[in-house]
Amino acid sequence: MNNRTAVFFASLGLCSSLLLVPAVTHAQAKGTTVEEIVARVNNQIITLSDYQKAAAGLQQEASQDCQNCSQMQIQASVTEHQKNLLRDMIDQQLLIERAKDMDVSVETDLVKRLDDVRKQNNLSSLEDLEKAVEQQGIVWEDYKTQLRNSLLTQEVIRREVGGRMNIGSDEVKAYYEAHKQEFNRPEQVSLAELFLSTDGKSPEEISAVRTRADDLHNRLVKGEDFEQLVKRYSEGSTAQQNGDLGEFERGQLSKQLEDAVFTMEKNQFTDVIQTKTGFEILKVLDHFQAGLQPLDKVDGEITNVLYRQKMDPAMRVYLAQLREESYVLVKPGYTDSAAVAGATVIQEVAPTPDAADKKKEKKKLPVPKATS
């Protein structure tokens, strides 16, 4: 999934997601216009405030994606992504409705994700997380809805798109042969971390954290899975990526860490290491010797590259199919970059008194009269 597909899961507040949460007020139910409607997706609406909130989030997203970029570069990214903003909001709503049609449930994952967010922000309880969220002006129930929607869309994409893509060994080999120069590298190690924070803690608390770190190390020695322990206990920003830190050459790490990891082989892990901010255990995911890397060393990397290359067009095909099965109506003056030529647009008409009382036999809205 590329960065634009990831707009579905863009961050908001404490590791949340920039998602559409349409709200139908009592006044709307009576047919009274409360707010400008930018688009309708089946029985759901995208309002002007939804659109403006998403547009404001683009600035934050661009800043996070490119922390070393100039303000001009960030603004250029925002401008480019603005072109597809309404498309992405419509796409997300289509995926949420598809999840409902598939009876997808993510409640167990939601509880785990909230707990992960709590740990990443060094909070002692979910009640503390709720307070922290609301201090940012975000309603707690909206926050949970946003996370739930993010998990729902990810699961739909996994089942309906990612799970149906096959990357054959012949494709991997062909890519390797055509890009051998990319795999002629200096010695590198690929690392993951399990991190426990000591930031702001007293000496007694730091001692307790050290005890926890030693216990986790002993569990690894006994054969427990590193990734599972990372997901459950790690307090680092990499916890949601299984602790993945990336690849490092000699000279890119402190001497203490370099001396430890460059003597290790794939799947070995370090003793507990104390840093300025906590205790960590590093795992060597792979150790690449200098020179042309053999295919078996980089086949997983190549598979990921090919997967990303195929994901975006596959997503667009899938979302086009969802659009064909749905009513997607956009108000004139707003651009849906994935709109089908000749698609119906919203035409404002006065509401009839009994419009909201008519029982809908289907979830889809009647098609409004098209504008010329």
Image (cartoon, rainbow, N blue to C red):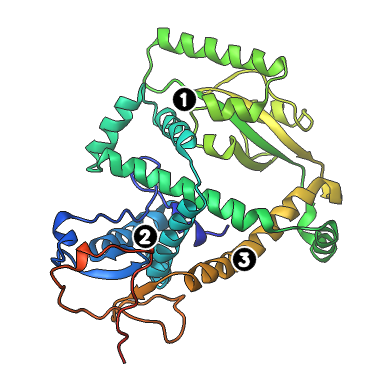
Q: Which residue is drawn at 35% across and 74% down?
A: 329
Q: Position of residue 263 (x, y in %)?
A: 77, 28
Quadrant where the C terminus sits is: bottom left
> In front: mark 1 or mark 2?
2
Task: Identify the amino acid type marked 1.
Answer: Thr
- What element does badge 2 sit on? helix
Marks 3/2: CA–CA distance = 24 Å
Q: Name the residue under label 3.
A: 314
The reply to whether the C-beta atoms of the residues labelled 3 and 2 are less than 8 Å apart is: no
Q: Position of residue 6 (x, y in %)?
A: 49, 56
Marks 1/2: CA–CA distance = 31 Å
Q: Name the residue under label 2.
A: 58
Q: Which residue is drawn at 71% across and 60% down?
A: 306
Q: Taking the image as drawn, is residue 162 in sight?
A: yes
Q: Nearer the N terminus, badge 3 or badge 2? A: 2
Q: Mark 1 points at which residue?
A: 277
Q: In this view, does 345 lie above or below 136?
A: below
Q: Nearer the N terminus, badge 1 or badge 3? A: 1
Q: Residue at x 85, y 63 (%)?
A: 177
Quarter of the rendering containing residue 117: top left
Marks 1/3: CA–CA distance = 42 Å
Task: Identify the amino acid type marked 3.
Answer: Ala
From the viewer's perspective, tell me whether residue 239 is left or right of residue 263. left
Q: In this view, does 71 lie above or below 195?
A: below
Crowding near the residue tagged with mark 3, few <14, some 14–19, many ≥20 C-alpha atoms within 10 Å: some
From the viewer's perspective, tell me whether residue 288 is left or right of residue 251. right
Crowding near the residue tagged with mark 1, few <14, some 14–19, many ≥20 C-alpha atoms within 10 Å: few
